[in-house]
Amino acid sequence: MKKVIVATILFAAALTGAIAWKIQAQEEAEHGPPAGSGVVEGEAVDISSRLGARINEVLVAEGASVEAGDVVLTLDCDEPEARLAEAVARLGAARAQAEGAGASASAAHDQSRAARASVTAAGANIAALSAQSSVADREATRVEEMGNHAALSRRDQARSTATRLEAQAAGARASRAASRRQAAAARSQAGAATAQAEAALQNIAAVEAIVRTAQIAVAECQIISPRSGVVERVYYEPGELVMPGSVVARIVDPAFVRATFYLPNGDVDTAVVGRHASVEADAYPGRTFEATVHRVSLEAEFTPRNIQTRTDRDRLVFPVEVRVPNDEGLLRTGMPVVVTLGEGT
């Protein structure tokens, strides 16, 4: 009987102590700084393929460290390389065509300048012949006024000279007209040759763009890590076919991790971006990690069902994300942690 009484007393004492501890913990939680539980998440980057191709080689393993610019895997590049070779050949042909068109345009412009020079020379010749003809006419008139036999002979000679010069001037005018037609034709040919040369240059620019596109495609045959970190997942094996946009690997930066916890409406005003916080993990008892509030959600939501009681799940809360420097790499993705807000920024 005494044993029963003693056991009952001990049980009652233990129950009372547990209740008192729980009440004290609740009071401390109510009057202590805002806090909540969360899970460590890494700063992850999904690496995607821009090409649809077969994987040749996977150069990293899950858990391996990589630096920004390291090759993660390579793709079969036969088709992109063939397109690049074709584009380079087309570029060479386009440049040769442009060179020929430029030479033709230069020759056409030379012909046009020569034709214009012929027109100018013909005009000068016409002017000279007309001037000489006028002089001969004036001389014939002057001599005729003298009235003697010798003067009449000189008059006839002057008029003959004037007639001959006028005929030469008429021939020169006809030659100038022909030169003008040739000059017009030469200008037209020069314009057409210039247009062809410009079209050839534009064709070069278009083919150069095709070459650059092909070069980009060839470069994409090597999938590069955009940042330093640790390979968390590799989703494909050599020989498998990837489609454009497929995620082939995930890189996590261990230097910074984040954790999201939840604050009720009454405490959300204490969560300010930039405020200090501390993070505790069960894996490292007695140790705290410094953190900073990185984001406070603008929209309330129900508490996640996996970490809260049913009473808590019925409350609306605000997610708060903190970032934690993790230079030692102690905090790992998936670790449960408790986040406590500090006194100030």
Image (cartoon, rainbow, N blue to C red):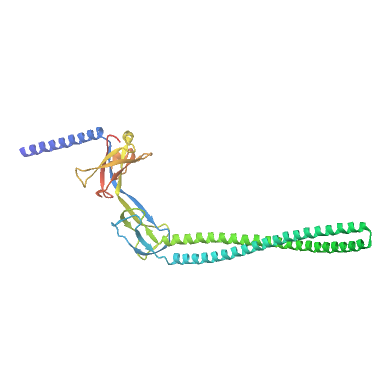
- Residue shown at 82%/62% (left/top)? 165
**Residue 99 vs residue 341, the one in the foreground:** 99
Image check: 263 left or right of 131? Answer: left
Residue 32: percent from the left, percent from the top? 24, 34
Relative height, residue 58 to residue 298 (above, below): below
Q: How many marks?
A: 0
Q: Quadrant of residue 317?
A: top left
Relative height, residue 213 to residue 330 (above, below): below
Q: Quadrant of the N terminus?
A: top left
Q: Quadrant of the C terminus?
A: top left
- Residue shown at 48%/62% (left/top)? 211
Image check: 121 left or right of 280? Answer: right
Residue at far left of view: 2
Q: Quadrant of residue 153?
A: bottom right
**Residue 135 vs residue 316, the one in the foreground:** 135
Q: Is residue 253 visible?
A: yes
- Residue shown at 32%/52% (left/top)? 252
**Residue 120 vs residue 98, the one in the foreground:** 120
Q: Is residue 311 visible?
A: no
Residue 158: percent from the left, percent from the top? 87, 62
Relative height, residue 90 to residue 230 (above, below): below
Image check: 336 left or right of 10? Answer: right
